[in-house]
Image (tube, rainbow, N blue to C red):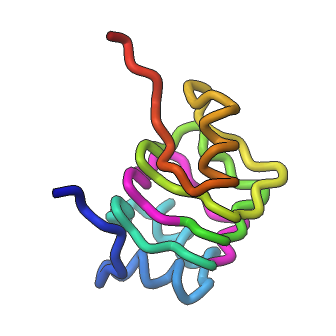
């Protein structure tokens, strides 16, 4: 059975849900940890979020505003970005453009290439 994205009690996650991106970034810069794996991030305006080093694996971003976010140092494996605004966003280099497009248009989970 696979995990499903959920609303979490994590205080850092709650800051994102409340739109307090500057406070989230400030606390992260101070070393605060957060768990964003399998997080329900639907419909949120996350512009300005510092995503460096964050693990969003299995998370659900449906129709969120991700414009301008740099995800190059983030883990997005298994995340879904269906219907998101992604203008100016940077994705991990290992993600192929067709993977991003499939997730954006059809809601498929982002799959990283395997070295099989």
- Is residue 53 part of the magenta span, yes or no? yes
Prevailing SS of the magenta stretch: loop
- Is 42 magenta? The answer is no
Taking the spot 62% from the left edge, 84% from the top edge, the residue there is: 19
Q: As drawn, which residue projects farthest toward the right?
A: 87
Q: Which image quarter holds the C terminus?
A: top left
Q: Residue at x 30, y 67 (%)?
A: 4
Spot the residue most to the bottom: 18
Judge left or right: residue 8 versus residue 14: left
Residue 27 left/right relative to 103: left
- Tell me the quarter of the image containing the N terminus: bottom left
* Residue at 57%, 57% in the rendered image: 107
Q: Is residue 27 above or below residue 109?
A: below
Q: Nearer the viewer, residue 99 or 31?
A: 99
Q: How many marks?
A: 0
Q: Quadrant of residue 58?
A: bottom left
Residue 66: x, y in percent?
A: 70, 62
Residue 76 in the image: state x and y as whole percent. 48, 46
* Outermost residue, top side: 116
Query: Residue at 68% of width from left, 76% of height from top?
Result: 45
Q: Which residues are magenta?
A: 44-60
- The answer to whether residue 58 is left or right of residue 68 is left
Q: Residue furthest front?
A: 106
């Amino acid at each position: 059975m696979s995990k499903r994205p959920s609303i979490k009690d994590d205080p850092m996650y709650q800051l994102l849900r409340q739109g307090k991106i500057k406070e989230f970034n400030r606390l992260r810069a101070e070393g605060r940890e957060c768990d964003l794996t399998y997080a329900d991030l639907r419909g949120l305006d996350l512009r300005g979020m510092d995503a460096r080093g964050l693990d969003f694996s299995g998370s659900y971003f449906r129709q969120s505003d991700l414009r301008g976010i740099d995800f190059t140092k983030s883990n997005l494996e298994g995340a879904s970005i269906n219907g998101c605004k992604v203008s100016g966003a940077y994705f991990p280099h290992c993600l192929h453009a067709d993977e991003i497009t499939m997730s954006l248009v059809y809601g498929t989970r982002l799959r990283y290439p395997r070295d099989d």
